[in-house]
Image (spheres, rainbow, N blue to C red):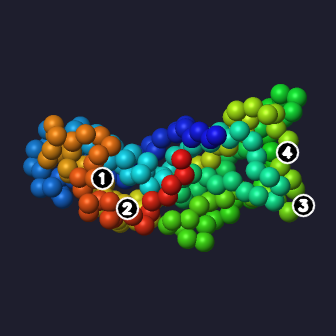
Amino acid sequence: MASLTLTTPPSIEPLFASDLRDVRRVDDGAETFLLDTWLQTAREDVEAYCGVALLTQTWTLKLDGFPDDDDFFELPRNPVQSITSIQYVDANGVTQTMSSSDYRLIDPADPVGGSYRVTLGFGKSWPTTRDDVNAVTVVFVAGYTERRLIPPALLSAILLIAGNLHEQRDETIVGTIFASLPTVTNLLARYRRRWF
């Protein structure tokens, strides 16, 4: 079993109320808070649906153990900037931290739809962990480092979702938005990864 928790959210949003105003031709400056809220909601939906991190954010992945020797595990958010730490509970119940020389982060062959993998360093083996849930904790940083690096299709999907929330204020049920917006589903199709 595995669990994933957002530890540190992005410090800024990739799109602003002014971007949504331009696209939707909204003139009322009084709705800035609502527009920003809808943009954040749309970003979070896109990230969850696709398994991506649009701007720098820190995640904590908990695993019940390491894979078999010479195997790897995947990080469930793209793109990965770095691994902050890999800790595990050893057979004696003591928390240990792996040296960064013991493992490698492998970029996917397809950076859009592929997975970042953590593999063993040359001549290394995965440590023995206590037979317990969440025995391994991986903290990693994911996300594009600049807005201009985010694929335009993902930004377009955010604008469409937020625009729909603006237009259909009382009729949208969270979690059904992709079914009601086929253009969004099409925009996100090639970026979607299924991990959990």
Say which mark, if any, is on residue 127.
4
**N-terminal of the two: label 1 or label 2?**
1
Q: Secondary structure at mark 3?
A: loop
Q: CA distance from mark 4 to mark 2?
A: 38 Å
Residue at label 1? Answer: 178
How busy is the neighbourhood of tag 2: few (under 14 within 10 Å), some, or many (20 plus)? some
**149, above or below 5, in the image:** below
Say which mark, if any, is on residue 188.
2
Whether the residues at callouts 1 and 2 have beta carbons within 8 Å, the answer is yes
Q: Position of residue 182 (x, y in %)?
A: 26, 60
Q: Secondary structure at mark 4?
A: loop
- Looking at the rendered structure, the kind of residue marked 4 is Pro
Q: Residue at x 83, y 27 (%)?
A: 93
Q: CA distance from mark 3 to mark 2?
A: 39 Å
Q: Position of residue 72 (x, y in %)?
A: 73, 57
Judging depth in this view, the residue of 126 and 196 nearest the camera is: 196
Q: Is residue 150 left or right of residue 29?
A: right
- Looking at the rendered structure, the kind of residue marked 3 is Gly
Q: Residue at x 56, y 65 (%)?
A: 114
Whether the residues at callouts 3 and 1 have beta carbons within 8 Å, the answer is no
Residue at label 3? Answer: 123
Q: Nearer the viewer, mark 1 or mark 2?
A: 1
**Furthest-top residue in this view:** 93
Q: CA distance from mark 1 to mark 4?
A: 42 Å
